[in-house]
Image: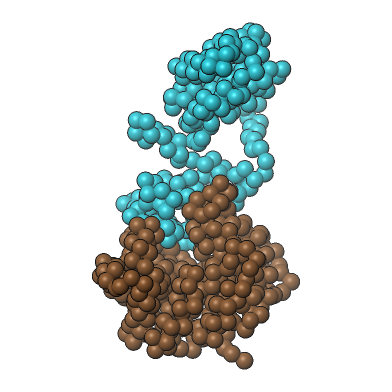
Amino acid sequence: MAKSFKEILSSGEFVITSEIGPPKGTNVEKMVHHIELLKDKVHGLNVTDNQSSVMRLSSLAACHIIKDNGGEPILQMTCRDRNRMALQSDLISAYVLGIHNVLCLSGDHIYLGDHKGAKQVFDLDSVQLIAAVKGLEQGKDLGGNALDGAVEFCVGATATPEADRMDAQLLKFRKKVKVGAEFFQTQAVYDMEKLKAFMEYAMQFEVKILAGILVLISPGMAKYLNANVAGVTVPQELIDEMTGVEKGKALQKGIEIAARQIKQIKEEKICPGVHIMAIGKEEIVPEILAMAGL
Amino acid sequence: MIVAEQKPIQEIKTMMAKYQKILVVGCGTCVTVCMAGGEKEVGIIASCLRMALKLEGKEPEIIEGCIQRQCEWEFIDELKEKVEGVEAVLSSACGVGVQALAERVGNKPVYPALNTTFMGMPKEHGLWVENCRGCGNCGLGKFGGICPIARCSKELLNGPCGGSQNGKCEVNKEMDCGWQLIYERLNVLGQLDQIEDIILPEDWSTDRDKGQRRILREDVKI
């Protein structure tokens, strides 16, 4: 039997995870194609949870499909759409469906998505959600009630190595470690020096940090990230590199940049692994990996 | 104080169009201070309503009034005669005042002229901000006097989310990140250790979640 994600994390192997975006609707054809393409090339496949506050097929259902197709799913769970009852219920449900990895996040604000008038929840925050998972592992729910059958997860969280106000972010990071996060998948990083600085701090803790690699697909995307996405900064030289190619070649350049970064992270041992995000273009991930020599 | 703002006159007009005799009544407390529904604003709302209805060929009689507090029976009772003479009341008090008035006058419909928005304060002239959500379990002592429930757009209790940038919130670049403010304030106070420990999930049973909240004090009951 293939190793579980938890075993991979402690094996010393360079860890590779990627991401699957569930469809908005019932047509899972493209998603299944991406799963088939990636499942044997990465150690874990995250499924986003109503990413960017856009309503989609649930992370739980998509993780189940990954499992059915022989992949190792990582269930992303945000605190935005469900209260503590629903979150715990979904965690138990995920476990019985064979989903044994979970990534706990706060979640984007509802106002950033496609249901701006919806009521957001945030009954728990990401730290409390991690603690809730650990509680379920001990056979107890947040109400203090005993479970008939506990869960056992590999629990992850997120971090933002390029945040501009690092002190407050590190407080949150420490708390996530303290409550039991075993691995981190970071927000997209483009500046390797900032990633190294973050890792210097993070190394004191017994957690595995997978560097977030967000593939640039156009110069416009780079500018959009800089203007609109908190904690992500694409340096000018990368924007110039993306702009400098002839028309129609930007995606290829983005693939090259991603592969280069992964290679550097691995060779210089900056992080023990990477998390590759190719939002909507998951089919390019095998090429990135090949180019990075993985 | 309770901060409110006036509803669009079109909405007010639609609510009041069927009446021939209307009392517009203001409140002399919070909504006077936030310049939304005091005596002066009652005059403006009544004039706008007259003009809006006149454009539709209607000329109802609109009477104006203002009492010190619309959330207390003794002040509402001053309006008794005025209310008896009209078909409907348009209240420019907060939602508490509108409901108190509706309950007290009983047989007359009462309509809101304002949208009651939050508990807050004027931060600068013309700018009001929300500072308290009335959760019923004040934790300000722990957070350096800055409330994460009212001032973090996700009500997070254990630190900022990844959407905090340049000290601002991901929802709106004009809005301060509540958690950045908390962190900086506790740093100045030398009290960062207060938030280093895990803050457990909030007990929302003191919030709205057990229905209408009430406080019963035997010591002050008559």
Can residue A155 be seen at all in this image of the molecule? no
Instruction: Residue A31: give x, y in percent of width and height.
Output: 58, 73
Image quarter of the C terminus of chain A = bottom left
Which quadrant is home to the N terminus of chain A?
bottom right
In brown, which chain?
Answer: A
Which quadrant would residue B65 be assigned to in this image? top right
Q: Nearer the viewer, residue B148 or A189?
A: A189
> What's the image's color scheme?
by chain
Q: Residue at x 35, y 53 (%)?
A: B167
Residue B125 in sight from this viewpoint = yes
- A223 sits left or right of A273 in the view: left
- Residue in the image at 63% along x and 81% along y: A69
Q: Is residue A76 above or below residue B79?
A: below
Image spot of residue B147 (x, y percent): 46, 46
Q: Compared to A164, does A261 lie above or below?
A: below
Chain B's colour?
Answer: cyan
The residue located at (44%, 59%) in the rendering is B161
